[in-house]
Amino acid sequence: MSRSLVIAPQWIGDAVMTQPLLRRLHARGERLTVGAVPWVAPVYRAMPQVEQVLEFPFQHGGLQWGARRRLGRELHGRFDTAYVLPNSLKSALLPFLASIPRRVGYLGEARVGLLTHRLKNPQDKPPMVAFYSALSGEREGLEQDRPVLRLDAREIDAALAAQGLRRGGYLVFAPGAEYGSSKRWPVEHYAALAASLQQPVLLLGSGKDTPVCEAIAAAAPNCRNLAGHTSLAQAFALIAAARAVVSNDSGLMHVAAAFGVPQVALFGSSSPLHTPPLNDAARVVWLKDDPGYQPPLDCAPCFARECPLGHHRCLRDVRPERVAGLVQGAVSSA
């Protein structure tokens, strides 16, 4: 049986979207170890195809040559194949330093000599799940791949008990977006939506999302701010047991999709053609493809971190009452 090391992306949403690739590799008999930074490792612990998760001692930015070289020596001889999912030079260094015989990845950042099997990067922005799944070398059915995460029922029950909640007795809002403000639905819209739904709402996110979540909670009494107060694994459990989830295009949007939770996903500067929530119970709002929205959003998708034109129409003009109707529709059809 082949032993494979998967070098994971450093973003939660991207990590979720790699699950179909791992499912393909596992199905053909590869024993999978995933190397991931600590803030992404919980995603892979929710994938039953993964035999082991190695938490890398790396941080954002910097080559960290010494740490990579030491870890490379420790991993020498342990793996037959490495799949390098990020496109960066430094992500391809570890499999090279570990002398893993077969090293698979996309071309990028002058790393030709670090990879033994190289795929050309697509010119456009393809669906990311298919982009990752193609690293398997298989071509059939990539467009049908959907991420699926699993949690033990005891993990979910423990997270609910810690917050005094019951399954399906609350909604989750994930109002953050690590990428930038161009992907965030306005605070006042989230607050108005919470007030109109009149159900308990948990606000989830990282510590960086705390100010946004505090502002929403201050304006909507039925909201409880847990941003920065749960582990990622606990946040997963609370999402998995929620009645519905409302989010921006973010990592937690993909988590909700992978658990099959009814959801409404709000897209602004990014595109649901590139990173959709692959979930039959999902409703997507993107004014770019809304024929009734005028004047048309010729600027979208810009994929910018901040609105280059300063108007943020792509999200500001999504009304809370529209989203409320979509939430009810997603729940009733699930």
Image: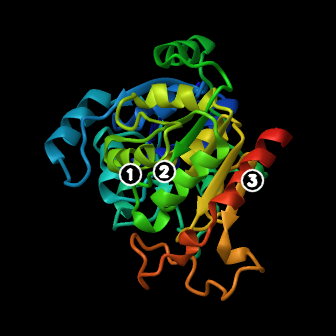
Mark 3: few/some/many CA within 10 Å (<14, 14-19, 20+):
many
Q: Secondary structure beneath disc 3?
A: helix
Q: Which quadrant is home to the N terminus? A: top right
Of pointers 2 and 1, the one earlier in the residue sequence: 2
The answer to the question of whether label 3 and label 2 lie on touching residues, with beta carbons closer than 8 A, is no
Q: Secondary structure at mark 2?
A: loop
Q: Secondary structure at mark 1?
A: helix
Q: Which mark is residue 175?
A: 2
**Label 1 amino acid?**
Val
How far is disc 1 from disc 3 in space, using C-alphas?
23 Å
In this rendering, the answer to whether 48 lies above or below 162 is below
Q: Name the kind of residue labelled 3 in the image.
A: Leu
* Disc 2 from disc 1: Cα separation: 7 Å
Position in image of residue 306 (x %, y %): 39, 73
x, y percentage for residue 268? 56, 68
Q: Which residue is mark 3?
A: 326
Q: Residue furthest left?
A: 66
Mark 2 or mark 3, which is nearer the start of the sequence? Answer: 2
Measured as percent of width and height from the top left, residue 110 is found at 34, 67
Give x and y (percent) for residue 113: 35, 60
Q: CA distance from mark 3 to mark 2?
A: 17 Å
Residue under numbered circle 1: 212
Q: Is residue 16 visible?
A: no
How packed mark 2 is, by other alpha carbons closer than 10 Å (few <14, some 14-19, many 20 or more), is: many
Name the residue located 31 percent from the left edge and 31 percent from the top edge. Answer: 76
Q: Earlier in the sequence, mark 1 or mark 3?
A: 1
Task: Quarter of the image for the C terminus: give it.
Answer: top right
Residue 125 vs 113, above or below: the answer is below
Residue 127 appears in view: yes
The answer to the question of whether label 2 and label 1 lie on touching residues, with beta carbons closer than 8 A, is yes
The amino acid beneath tag 2 is Pro
